[in-house]
Structures are given as structure tokens and as C-alpha cells.
Image: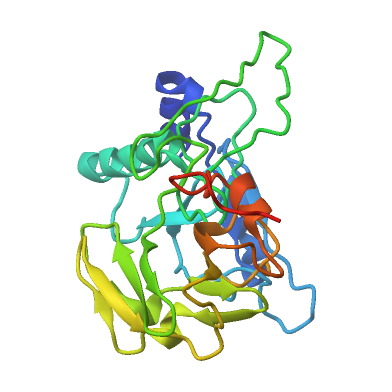
Amino acid sequence: MDQLQKDLRESEPNLQIEILGVNDFAESAGNPSMTEGRDIPLLQDIDSDGDRLSDNWLNTWDFVYRDVVIVDANNIAVDTYNLTLHSLEEPDSYQTLRQMLIDVAIGAIDANDDLFAVVTGQEADIDVLSNDQGISRLEIESVTVPPHGSAEAITVEFPADLDSVERRIPEIIISEIVPGEYIELYNSRYYEIDLNDVSQVLVSGQHHVAISDLGQELSISARGYRQLPWPESMTATSQSGEFLLYRDNLSGFDVSWKIDDFVAWGDAVADSRIDLAIEADKWYGPPDGTLDLG
């Protein structure tokens, strides 16, 4: 492992790959022989609760003896390589582990709900939308300028399932509303969507209903439409009404950034959320500009 560490520092210095050893609590007596003549740091696990077991080794870690545990820049274990099964004296094993370490170090960093961490001074590709549960935007709060140079934050737009970094295209949007009869939804994706798994919520005034409840045992085909029965709690009429499609109900219904779709017709309604819809760029006014906002 000393040779591998030296190899990586010389051949891939920008990746800053560091190899550490970790020893079981009960094996501390062997530390002198394990560290003699070696440069790699050895971390000694402890038994803080007195149960005669290591606090981390094989208890909270799902690994086995002599596993090389590879973690990413977020300190998340992503792979293992066992040295009992694969001796580094074998050239193929050495090259395999070496490449595994390099691949993880240069791989894109997954942003967890718009949060990520990188090693100081290290360049990194960031998968901004990975595991994204909130607004489709990554905001950089601060950049520490390294002593040897400068740092620049730039804005990049993503054309994938987004119009831009500012805008998110929902899986499901409202297609048509016939008050008292049905609500028709549209699937914007190229795959079938099971409505039992959808987290979106229909909101009108003080009433709301989950799409998963309204569309039990139903699905929407790829790029298809589905009519759902009219929710009994909703009181909209053909003369006036307002419906919002919220991404979920985790933040309540008084935030703009979770509005996936908005439909309004006729006169303004009580408890209107049209200002939130305008803030979310989900409402630009009716085609003829005649909506009376009171």
C-alpha cells in the first residue's frame, strides 16, 4: 500500500488520494509491527462504551477484515477491494485497485439536495441534479480563495429535463379541468408513471388532495393523459376556480417554489394563491387578458 500511495501521489497529484489504515480495537498490540517501515498512517479504533467491541470496525461499518474501503469527496463509501482475495503483489490486482481509486476521485460529485463538498484546491465535476429534492438550482454561498491563486464561480444552464437552471419541468401537469366532473393530467415523460407513487398534491383554496389518493390503482402512459374523478372537497364552478399542483405537502402550500402547475378561470377566488403562481413563473394571465383580480 505504501508503494500504491507513492505511485498515486507522483502520477495523480491533483486527485489528492490518501490511503489510511484502520485497526480493530482488540488488535492494538500488533500496531508496532504493522507500522514498522511503513509511511501510511494507521488509525486505531477504540472501545468508548466498554462493550469490548470496536466502536466502528465491523459494527457500524458493513465491511470485512482487510477490505480497502474507498470513499468519495463526501466521505461516502462507494466501493471495497479485499486484499485477502486480491494480493497487491499480483500486477492485475494492483492495477485494478489503483484504477478504482482514480475513478472515484475523478468521478462527478453527487449533490445531495443541492449540497456538496469538495477538497480545497481540487477541481471537481458536480452532478447538480443528483438526489435533488428541492428547487433545481445550486447556489454557491461562499468560495474560499486559495493562497496560490483565485476562484471563480460561473453559472451554467442544463438542457436535460430543465429549460434552464432556473426552471424545472414537472413529470405531471394539469391538462384540463371540468368542474364537478373530472381533472385531466398529462405525463410529460417518455415512460409510464404509476400514480400511486406520485407525491404531488392538488390544492384549491383551503382544500387539498394527494394525486396518489385520487388516482389509486391508476397510471398514465408515456406522454399520455388520464382523467381523474372530481375531488369531493373541491368547490370550484364553471364560473370561477383555481387549482394548483404542488410537488408535495412537506412544506405546506404557502411557498412558490414547489408549485408545479397553476390553473385559474373566471373571477378571483377567496384564499387565492395567484401571487405565488406568478412568483413561480406558473401564471402569466389568461390568453385574452380578461381575468378580474378584484
Residue located at (56% from left, 52% from top): 291
Residue sitting nearer the eye, 126 or 92: 126
Residue located at (60% from left, 72% from top): 249
Taking the image as shown, residue 91 lies to the left or right of residue 170, namely left
| Residue 97 lies in quadrant | top left
In the image, is residue 31 above or below residue 248?
above
| Residue 143 lies in quadrant | top right
Q: Residue 44: x, y in percent?
A: 68, 58
Q: Residue 14: x, y in percent?
A: 49, 22
Taking the image as shown, residue 212 lies to the left or right of residue 187, namely right
Q: Which colour scheme is used?
A: rainbow
Q: Residue 123: x, y in percent?
A: 51, 24
Residue sitting nearer the eye, 84 or 163: 163
Residue sitting nearer the eye, 38 or 150: 150
How many marks do you count on the picture? 0
Residue located at (74% from left, 73% from top): 47
Q: Residue 188: x, y in percent?
A: 29, 57
Residue located at (53% from left, 82% from top): 209
In the image, is residue 97 above or below residue 133?
above
Which quadrant does the C terminus fall into? Answer: bottom right
Residue sitting nearer the eye, 167 or 157: 167
In the image, is residue 25 above or below residue 138?
below
Which quadrant does the N terminus fall into? Answer: top left
